[in-house]
Each structure stands twice: as C-alpha cells, then as structure tokens.
C-alpha cells in the first residue's frame, strides 16, 4: 500500500492511498482512494477510515475479478510461499504467544482476522498492543499496533485453529 500526501495552496491536504495486488498480469487489482482534508491533523485523525475504504474497495475488486487461476503474490521476503494460492500469511509480534509468519486460509485472514485488526488498532501508548502484519496480498498489510487483549483472546485462537502448516 502506498500513500501520497500533498499540501495544497489553500492549506488543505490531499491524501491518495493506493493498494495493488498482482504483478502487472491480467489478474492485477489496484484501488486508489483520494480525499482532501482541511489540514494535516484532520487527515491523521481520519487515516484509519481512509485505510478502511481502501481495504473495502480492494475486497470488492477481488470479488469482482477473482478467478480460480489467481496466484498468491507479495509474500514478504524471507518467507516461503509453498502453501498454494488460497493462503495468506499473518505475523504476530512481541507480546503474542505465536511467532513468525503463519500461513492461513485467505478467507480466514480477509473475513475474520483483518477486520479485527482494523477495529482494534491502538493509538494510545497506555494501552498494551501487539504488532501485527500481513503478507502483501492483504489490503491491510504493514505493521499495525493491535490491542493485546484482542490479539490473545480473539486473533491467536483463530490463528491456532486455522493455520495450514504443521506447527
């Protein structure tokens, strides 16, 4: 996911977020959300909603353009992608009882884990959090600080139950 922030002459801020899945082939999906805010503070306050829109639009684009021949792409460097096209990976950071890149069914990542991550993102430094990341095929890829309680009580059980590796 890439983001461009431009300050306009009138003091407002233009934010453009682009998410792309694929490698330039016919099954590539790309979504761009562009919006203008009064100032940088407002843009920062509403950044979670902009990311949510990108994720929703990418999911919609995948539903429309998803084919049986689609490949899993964008797996983070240093990970193996031998699990097949219906697999995405999640990484739970320090504070989690699960470590490393864990392969999971794409459906579980998109429908159950990613929405919990988006809803439970913490900005308050007084709330304990765990860093969570996804393989690049997931619209919310990138490090996100997630409420530690949600990670341990909701996300970890999903990961344990649905992981597709032998661990």
Image (cartoon, rainbow, N blue to C red):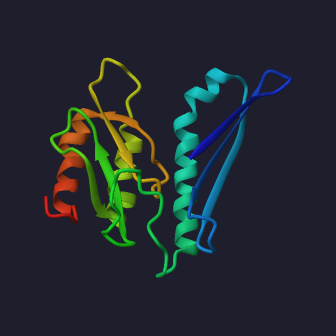
Q: Quadrant of residue 159?
A: bottom left
Given the current orientation, which residue lies at the most extreme bottom position? 68
Q: Nearer the viewer, residue 60 or 162?
A: 162
The image shows residue 40 at horizontal and vertical percentages of: 66, 23
**Residue 110 against residue 37 in the figure, above or below:** below
**Residue 46 against residue 126 in the figure, above or below:** below
Given the current orientation, which residue lies at the most extreme right position? 9
**Residue depicted at 42% across the width and 57% down the height:** 75
Q: Nearer the viewer, residue 140 or 57?
A: 140
The image shows residue 137 at horizontal and vertical percentages of: 47, 58
Q: Nearer the viewer, residue 113 or 80?
A: 80
The image shows residue 49 at horizontal and vertical percentages of: 55, 40
Q: Quadrant of the C terminus?
A: bottom left
Q: Quadrant of residue 149?
A: top left
**Residue depicted at 49% across the width and 53% down the height:** 139
The image shows residue 37 at horizontal and vertical percentages of: 71, 30
Q: Nearer the viewer, residue 124 or 19?
A: 19
Q: Quadrant of residue 129?
A: top left
Given the current orientation, which residue lies at the most extreme top position? 126
**Residue depicted at 58% across the width and 74% down the height:** 65
């Amino acid at each position: 996911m890439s983001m461009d922030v431009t300050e306009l002459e009138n003091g407002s801020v233009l934010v453009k977020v682009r998410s792309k899945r694929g490698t330039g082939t016919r099954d590539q999906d790309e979504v761009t959300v562009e919006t203008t805010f009064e100032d940088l503070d407002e843009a920062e306050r509403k950044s979670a909603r902009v990311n949510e829109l990108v994720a929703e639009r990418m999911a919609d684009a995948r539903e429309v353009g998803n084919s049986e021949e689609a490949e899993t792409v964008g797996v983070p460097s240093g990970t193996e992608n031998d699990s097949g096209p219906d697999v995405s990976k999640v990484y739970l950071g320090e504070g989690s009882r699960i470590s490393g890149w864990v392969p999971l069914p794409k459906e579980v990542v998109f429908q159950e884990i990613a929405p919990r991550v988006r809803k439970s993102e913490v900005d308050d430094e007084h709330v304990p959090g765990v860093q969570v990341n996804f393989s690049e095929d997931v619209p919310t890829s990138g490090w996100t600080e997630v409420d530690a309680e949600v990670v341990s009580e909701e996300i970890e059980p999903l990961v344990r139950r649905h992981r597709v590796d032998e661990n």
